[in-house]
Structures are given as C-alpha cells and as structure tokens.
Image (tube, grey):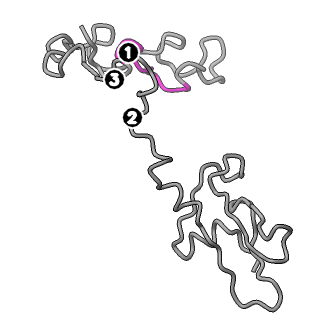
Amino acid sequence: AGKNLMKLGDSVDIKIPRGCRTGLCGACTVDLEDPSFPDGIQTIRACQTNVQVPPGCDEMVIDLHRMERAGDDDFSVKDPFARFEQIDTEYKPAATPKSRNTLVSITSCTTCDGTGKHICPECMGEGTMQNNAEIRCYVCMGRPYVRCADCQGSGMREG
C-alpha cells in the first residue's frame, strides 16, 4: 500500500513503458477502470501514482492495454524517410578503413621528445610560485611537470 505504481510493476517483472520519470512524456500512461469514477475510467501516469488498494478489496488489477496497441502495424513506421522526396538514404563512406590508415602517420612528438610531458613553464619545475615559495604553482599544482599540449601526454602525434 502506498507504493509507486512504476516501482511496483518493476518488482513483479511487469514492464511499463517509461521515458522521463516525471510524467511529462506520457509513455507510462495507464487507465484505471472503476465504476465509482465519473465515466468509469481515470487516466493516470504510472511514474507519478502511488497505489492504494480500496477498502474492502484484496487485490487490484491494472490493465496495460495501451502496450498491446503500441505493437500494432498501424503505429509502426516501416520507412521513416518515405515522406521525403529525392533523399539519399544509403551511406557511402569517403574512405575505407584500410585507406584511412595510410593517410595518417603517427610520429614521436617533437615538442616533448616523446615523453608526453615537459617542465612547467610557470614555475620552471619548482612546484611553487617564483615570487612566493609558500604558494603552490597554479599551472602544475605542485608537480614539476605538465602534460604536453601537442600530443596530450601520449608522446605520439599525427605527423
């Protein structure tokens, strides 16, 4: 009693459609049928509804008929591009993976001599500010080296 309908469905392995967990998308919309409701039906969002079994009842039946309708052929889209005229839907890559490997050559980074790091230009590898040794360097954060910007610390770059 008082459990969220979406969580209750998950706990008994009933998959209720979901999209946002706030009820705005409407994917979890279900209908409650009860003769005491006006028109006998009330539409709710499962993600925002807590379940309370009415007094005098031992169980509650929730019909997920909307899920059955979602699988109908009327609702499925066969070709989403059919509504456009003269659209090219076939992908043709400009270069094959084999030819792309020959276009790029990887060489050792000349900026850091292949190490991937170099001495911090702000503190010259000291780790502290030059004008105040008590303040840690804001570039290298106290480490004597910084990562090479040209190779992103890998030591290799495209040449």
Look at 43% across and 32% down and name the residue there.
80
Q: Nearer the viewer, mark 3 or mark 1?
A: 1
Q: How far apart are marks 3 and 1 (CA)?
A: 9 Å
Q: Mark 3 points at which residue?
A: 89
Q: Distance between the residues labelled 2 and 3?
A: 10 Å
Considering only order in the chain, which callout, 2 or 1, is on the residue closer to the N terminus?
Answer: 2
Numbered range of the magenta stretch: 141-151
Question: Which quadrant does the C terminus fall into?
Answer: top left
Considering only order in the chain, which callout, 3 or 2, is on the residue closer to the N terminus?
Answer: 2
Note whether 109 is above or below 31 in the view shown: above
Q: In this view, does 128 lie to the left or right of 156?
A: right
Does 57 appear in magenta? no
Under mark 1, the amino acid is Gln
CB atoms of marks 3 and 1 within 8 Å = no
Question: Which quadrant does the N terminus fall into?
Answer: bottom right
Look at 82% across and 67% down and name the residue there.
39
Q: Is residue 76 left or right of residue 128?
A: left
Looking at the picture, tell me which residue is in the foreground, 39 or 66: 39
Note whether 45 is above or below 78 in the view shown: below
Q: Is residue 40 left or right of residue 112?
A: right
Dot 1: within a 10 Å radius of its alpha carbon, few (fewer than 14), some, or many (20 or more) residues?
few
Q: Position of residue 71 (x, y in %)?
A: 47, 55
Q: Where is residue 82 in the image (x, y as percent from the top left)?
A: 41, 28
Q: Name the residue under label 2.
A: 79
Q: Mark 1 points at which residue?
A: 86
